Image (cartoon, helix red, strand yellow):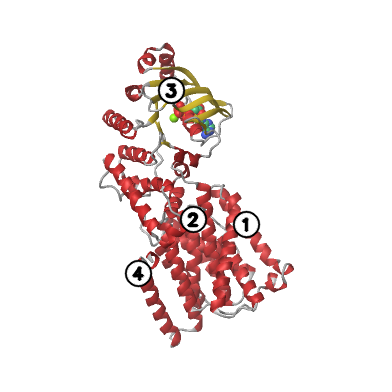
Amino acid sequence: MNAIEIEGLRKGFGGVKAVDGISFHVGEGETLGIIGPNGAGKTTVFNLITRFYVPDSGRIMFFEKDISHLPSYKLPRLGIGRTFQNLRLFQNLTVMENITSAVLCEQGYNVFSGIFRTEGYLLAEAKARQEAQRLIDFFQLTGREKDPARNLPYGEQRKLELARALSLRPRLLLIDEPGAGMNPREIQDLVTTIREIRERFSLTIIIIEHQMGLVMNISERIVVMDFGEKIMEGTPGEVKKDKRVIEAYLGEEFA
Amino acid sequence: MNFFVEARTQILVSLGVYIILKILFAFHFVSEYIEQITIYSFIVIIASLGLNVIYGYTGQFSLGHAAFYGIGAYASAYFSRIFGIEHVYSFLPVLLLSGAIAGLTGYLIGIPILRLRDDFLAIATLGFGTLVRVFFDNSDRFAEVLGGSRGFVGIPRITNLETVCFVTLFLIIITRNMISSRYGLFWRCIKEDETASMSIGIDTAKMKLMAFAYGCFLAGIGGALYAHLYTFLHPSNFDVLKSIDFLIIVILGGMGSIMGTIYAGIIWVGFIEGLRIILPAAMLDLRWVFIPLLLIALMMWRPYGLITKGR
Ligand SMILES: Nc1ncnc2c1ncn2[C@@H]1O[C@H](COP(=O)(O)OP(=O)(O)O)[C@@H](O)[C@H]1O
Ligand SMILES: [Mg+2]
């Protein structure tokens, strides 16, 4: 089965055709890479899938269910988690709270349990902290639970954002430029982590990268975008050799 | 019940405060005027706590808080008059109802305006505050008893030390529990980053409405207690300057701090009323020079509040 199927997706901002009729699909358990020069429309694709933008046209199917019309906040419950190109942590909340907030969205209790601190409340809170702790340990953030997120070094903030997205137990994870602002060693570390995540949580992943290195390493298939369009699709090997891809990237270098 | 078990400290402190104040009042160690402003400071704390939920915790800037305070005050005074309420026990349901009316108004007005961000929200709440003030000014056209621009007179004096101590304690515990529950956590997430909040599944529109309605409920309760302390209401008690008072208290105490709001509420009432005592009557209006100056100094010197530690 396909985890996600995108058909003829379009989005313009004024005169800019940010995404101009994109179609692709990702099979369950597959990892798809999206690459392309800056401004190609990659992030816009994510924002359309998670409905931070409303598509001008096109259809998005998630496990054969049309999700084109669902509001953003309902998607995590269906199983879509995401990270952001420019990190969006809750900076003044603790590392623990950054994750429990996500867990408690799904495993909740009502207002009265909260006010009167019923057994249900205590149980749900304890369980949320336990789950969060598991992820904190997995991402080697142990000992920093009570620190505000803003106190973490950049690389660890990236990990925390991944941990937060994973705490939703997503079936599909959208990762936007995880390597941005990281040095080669941190990137290597990240590749290992993403591999582990994929195994352990049996996830379908779409990963955006601007640099080709990281994404070539972990994707089974790659979609190359330029000027809002898909200019080619193939295995990492095929993509590396393709003339159009080289041109798109060369064009950027000389721009 | 866990509600009380975990509130031991709060209950003991309140009891201590109550006993001390009761002794001071009973033996007339303080003047009746001081008595009144002491009770008034509890009321200010309750209403400011409401704004702290809305602005300090959830990040929704409101310039119309006094309108909800006024709605609670006028609603309760109206009920007291038509039902002939004189006693505390029959007053408590009126108190709750008036708070609920203010909360419901906040909910309804929040549906359209809470979609707005920052400056737009400020303007919308300011507009609503002005609208409510105009309504109070002309209220005698709807019901004679409301008094319009002459003011609402003849409200029974019911609010006393016992009432405010009990109500304040109860509301502080509820608010604290809300804040430390997942709802409070979602509010703080929204203040930090609305987009990220949606990405983890928080229904931000609903949560903002909830915070706003609850904050307005607290304002309404405060207003109702106020009406039955001073026994007289005038539309000018509920204008934008009053809203700014509440904002100053929240900022002074530090955004998102319950203890901060309590201290700042006491300091603020003491400061305003203190100036009234110190300044000769002819210069009383100078208060409105001191207050903005203080605000400017505060913003430059401690933008994160006087009481909480800076970032
Ligand atoms: N909210 C927006 N408003 C206006 N233009 C936008 C917006 N988001 C993206 N764009 C434009 O759409 C194009 C694609 O942007 P983006 O998807 O961020 O590219 P990428 O992630 O591939 O670098 C760019 O020209 C960008 O300026
Ligand atoms: Mg991008």
Q: How far apart are marks 1 and 3 (CA)?
A: 48 Å
Q: Which of marks 4 and 1 is in front?
A: 4
Q: Quadrant of the C terminus of chain A?
A: top left
Provide residue B283's location: percent of width, then percent of height. 55, 73
Q: Which residue does the numbered mark 1 point to in the structure image? A: B128
Q: Quadrant of the N terminus of chain A?
A: top left
Ligand 2 rendered quadrant: top left
Whether callout 3 and callout 2 share a subunit is answered no
Distance from mark 3 CB to nearest ligand 1 atom below 8 Å: yes
**Reading the chain from its start, which is encountered first: label 2 or label 4?**
4
Q: Which residue does the numbered mark 4 point to in the structure image? A: B9
Distance from mark 2 CB to nearest ligand 1 atom below 8 Å: no
Provide residue A227's location: percent of width, then percent of height. 50, 21
Q: Distance between the residues labelled 2 and 4?
A: 26 Å
Q: Distance between the residues labelled 2 and 1?
A: 17 Å
Residue A227 seen in render:
no
Q: Which residue does the numbered mark 3 point to in the structure image? A: A37
SS at badge 1: helix
